Amino acid sequence: MRTVTTLDELRTARFALKGTVGLVPTMGFLHEGHLSLIRQAKAECEHVVVSIFVNPTQFGPSEDLSKYPRDLERDLSLIEPLGVDFVWTPTAEGMYPTGYQTWVEVEALTHPLEGAKRPGHFKGVTTVVAKLFNGVQPHKAYFGQKDAQQAAVIRQMTRDLNFPLEVVVCPIVREADGLAMSSRNKYLEGAHRQAALVLFRALSAAKDLYETGGRDAEKIRAKMREVIEAEPLAQLQYVSCANYDTLDELDVVQGKTLLSMAVFIGKTRLIDNFVLG
Ligand code: AMP
C-alpha cells in the first residue's frame, strides 16, 4: 500500500483513481472506530483514501498536541489488510507553509459544547477538512458520530461551501464495557480506565430516564451530572441535552436529541454521546 506526503504526490495518486473515491480523515493512532469508517468507505466506494495528520491548528495552546499519540508504522499495518488505495500523510509545513493566512469558520454551530470549551478548535478542524477535501476531491467523506458536533459542523461547512461530496456519519464503536474507543484511551490506566466508564453510565442513566417517559431536559442533564459527580476521579466539563441539528439546549425533549458530555478523567479529556429519538 502506497503512502503519499506532498501535494504533487497526492495529485498523481488521486487522478490515477477512476470511479468513486471515499476519504477517511484521521489523526492516526488508529483503533476499531477508525477501521469501521474505512470498512464502510470500502463497502460504498470503488476507491478509499485515508489521511493521517495530527492537525496542529485544532489544538489549543494548553492542549496535548506534542503528547498526542503517534505510531505511523502500526497505523499502516492496521490499514494494509483493508484494501485502501493509498494513505496521505501530509506534514504540518506542507499544510501550513510560512505565510499561510486562510481559514474556514462555521459560525453558530461551533459556539456551544466543544466550541465553548476549546476556543479555535473548530476553526482548525474546518480549515484542515476543507484542505483535505480539496486535496483528495472525494465523492464521499466518512466521519464518526463519536465527535457529534464535529460531524454537524462538517456537514454544515460542506453544504455552505458547496463541496460536491456526501458526508457520511458512522456509529460510535465501543469497547465491550461501553467505553467509546478513542486514541486518548491509551492514557487511561488502572483506576482511571475503570473511572472512564462513568461517561457511558451517565449517558445510559439519562437514556433510561428518557425511555421511562422523562422529557424534562434539565432533569436529564441533572441525572448525567449526578452520575459523573459520584465518580471521584472524574471532573465534569459539561453535559448537554440539545437539539440534534441545531445543538441548542432543550427545555423539553422532542424529536432527535443529542445527549453529550466532556469529562476529565485525571488529565485525559474524554467526550461521548448518545442520540435519542
Ligand atoms: P480522530 O483520529 O480522533 O480525529 O478520528 C478520526 C475519525 O474517526 C473522526 O471522524 C472520529 O469521529 C472517528 N472516530 C473516532 N473514534 C471513533 C469511535 N469510537 N467510533 C466511531 N468513529 C470514531
Image: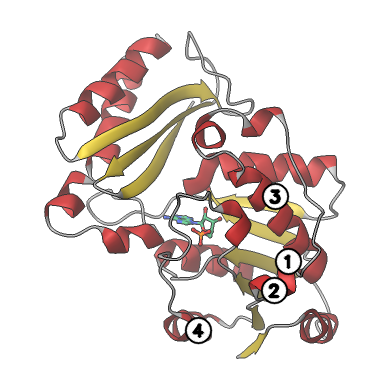
Q: What residue is pinned by disc 4?
A: 76
What amino acid type is highlighted by mark number 1? Tyr
Please report whichever mark, 4 or 2, sits nearer to the chain's N-terminal start. 4
What amino acid type is highlighted by mark number 3? Thr
Q: Residues within 10 Å of mark 4 (few under 14, many from 20)?
A: some
**Considering the image in quadrants, where does the N terminus appear?**
bottom right
**Residue sitting at x 62%, y 56%:** 57
Q: Nearer the viewer, residue 264 or 67?
A: 67
Q: Are marks 3 and 2 in contact (CB under 8 Å)?
A: no
Name above or below for residue 227 compared with residue 93.
above
Q: CA distance from mark 3 to mark 2?
A: 18 Å
> Exactly how many numbered labels are in the figure?
4
Q: Mark number for residue 126?
A: 3
Q: CA distance from mark 4 to mark 2?
A: 22 Å
Circle 2 — which element?
helix
Q: Are marks 3 and 4 in contact (CB under 8 Å)?
A: no
Q: Are marks 1 and 2 in contact (CB under 8 Å)?
A: yes
Q: What residue is pinned by disc 1?
A: 96
**Residue sitting at x 79%, y 61%:** 100
Q: Nearer the viewer, mark 3 or mark 1?
A: 1
Q: What residue is pinned by disc 2?
A: 93
Q: Nearer the viewer, mark 4 or mark 1?
A: 1
What amino acid type is highlighted by mark number 4? Leu
Q: CA distance from mark 4 to mark 1?
A: 24 Å
**Residue sitting at x 42%, y 13%:** 217
Judge whether residue 183 can be spotted in this image: yes
What amino acid type is highlighted by mark number 2? Glu
Q: Nearer the viewer, residue 109 or 41?
A: 109
Please report whichever mark, 3 or 4, sits nearer to the chain's N-terminal start. 4
